[in-house]
Image (cartoon, rainbow, N blue to C red):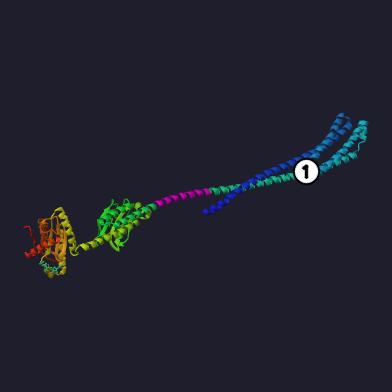
Amino acid sequence: MPASSSRLSSYRLPAFALALLLLLGVGIASVWGVSSLRTSNEWIGHTYEVINRIEVAERAIRSTEANARAYRLTGHPEFRSQYLIATHQVDTAHEALASAIRDNPAQHARVKRMREAAQAHLVELRRLFDLQELQGAEAARQATNSTLTLRQWNEFDTAASEMRREELRLLDQRKARSDRSATLLSAIVVLGMLLSGGLMISLMVSVTRENKRARRLELEARGAAHEMALSMAQVGELSKQRHELARYSGLLQSCQTLDEIVQLSIDTIRRLVPDASGRFYLIRASQNFHDSVASFGDHLISSPDSLMPADCWALRRGQAHMVSGEEARQLSCAHLDTGTPAPGITSLCLPLSAQGTSIGLLHVSAATDAMDHGSAVDELIGQLAEQLGLAIANLQLRETLRTQSLRDPLTGLFNRRYLEESLARELQRCERRNLPLSVLMLDVDHFKRFNDTHGHAAGDALLGQVGRQIQAGVRAEDIACRYGGEEFTVVLPELDAAGALVRAEQIRRAVEIATVQHLGQQLGPVTMSIGISTFPGDGLTPEVLLQLADATLYRAKAEGRNRVLHVSYDD
Ligand SMILES: Nc1nc2c(ncn2[C@@H]2O[C@H](COP(=O)(O)OP(=O)(O)OP(=O)(O)O)[C@@H](O)[C@H]2O)c(=O)[nH]1
């Protein structure tokens, strides 16, 4: 369509010029035709004039003849004077006739013949008139030569008739030419008007089409400009979102705790989708459940605190699962509380994984419009989830490594290396603040016998349980360690000997009454001996305090086991 239109437009100027030329031609032809008609009419008028003058000449000669004859017959003077006047008119009439046909030699020759015949007849009439004047009317009548008169009249009439015929022939010819000119002029005018009118109509149609096309193109151009503005806005939005994601990646590297990671992720998701809500889940050690670790927003679609992997399409398929609108009826995840997302709301489940291992789930819900704009938001949140999974996995790995380096794997308590570092630090802190610090040295009684009786694995299970009981028996700020073998140490900052005795007694009692479940058997209970040393009364350095607590422990063993002992050297 545009190609044909532009092809037509290239013909428009020549067509317009042709139409103008045609109109000009019609104008010129009209002027020429009118001029030609006027000339033809002039010639026709001229012919009538000549014919009229022929008749005037005939009338003049006949009037002369009639008056001369009447005078000859009656002698009446009136006829005499009329005769004399008429003789003058004959000359005048022939002069006028000769003047009218001076451009036509043949007619001119005929006028000459007419004139000669008329002159000859006038001479004869003059002769008879003079004779009548001198000798009377009878003599003139007697002298009349009828033969001569007839011959002169014949001569005159012949020339006049020839002349009239010729004029009538010319008249017919000129009328025919005038008719032709009029017909030709009419044809030219009609044809020219038709052609130029047709061209003008074509031009008008073409220009109208061109205008419509121009209007359509203008509308299309406006639409394109609008779309470009929209896409520019989308590009701007996309760039902003990518910037957010890049910022997220950078900050994620520096996060030290899960809380920091989760908070940063929430902030970033809320920046990408302002009114979004959602929940973070991490997989439990048992792998059976995903437990919620954090949530955000107004929960457009709520999801429970814990969910089974089978309840989530994303966890089952190992890939993002987004539903909204009609689709939600069939494919909504079972863990969503509403069953199906409300109209206009989109739900997005994203599995969190690292190196192919599932570690959790991110569920986000938001208005469908907010999730759809630029059609890249779900993709961006997907990228965020990928980085989030890796970050959590890294954190967990770091935590595991740190725990492995600082904690005893069997009991979960701190190891001896950590004890030595932290005892020195805590001792300095308490010394600065002038506060006491107590050290407990704990040992399972007859553990060798337990091992030998129930096996090494049962001994491990017992040590694990004792470790948990020791941890449960102290404050969060206390430091419980496995010193080695079946021996444990607890550092109790800011606690004096009396307080340490109470705490140690609680632990001893808890161990004494507990049994251990191992391979379906209930083993134990066992007892524990505990030695105490206290800063500053018993010693000032970590080494002294540990040695003293150890020595007191062996003294408790020696005194019969299953007891707590503190030896005050001040006493
Ligand atoms: N199952 C298990 N046994 C351990 C572990 N570490 C040390 N043991 C054993 O613990 C026993 C310690 O025995 P002893 O040092 O003789 O002390 P005891 O039998 O508890 O006797 P008393 O301390 O005098 O009450 C040894 O048999 C070690 O092999 C451990 O990690 N797991």
Quadrant for residue 334, please give it: bottom left
- Residue 198 in view (yes/no): no
Label 1: element kind: helix
**Label 1, on which residue?**
168
Residue 71: within the magenta? no
- Residue 34 in view (yes/no): yes
The spot of residue 247 in percent (x, y) is 33, 55
In the rendered structure, the answer to whether residue 509 lies left or right of residue 354 reads: left
Q: Which residue occupies the foreground of this view, 545 or 305?
A: 545
Residue at (70% x, 45% y) in the render: 181
Magenta range: 209-233
Q: How many marks?
A: 1
551 versus 221 height, above or below: below
Q: Which residue occupies the foreground of this view, 437 or 216?
A: 437
Q: How many neighbours does mark 1 have within 10 angstroms: few (below 14), some (14-19), or many (20 or more)?
A: some
Quadrant for residue 401, please give it: bottom left
| Residue type beneath disc 1 | Leu
The spot of residue 264 in percent (x, y) is 29, 54
Residue 231: within the magenta? yes
Q: Quadrant of the C terminus?
A: bottom left
Quarter containing ligand 1? bottom left
In the rendered structure, the answer to whether residue 123 lies left or right of residue 263 reads: right
Query: What main secondary structure does the magenta stretch of the protein show?
Result: helix
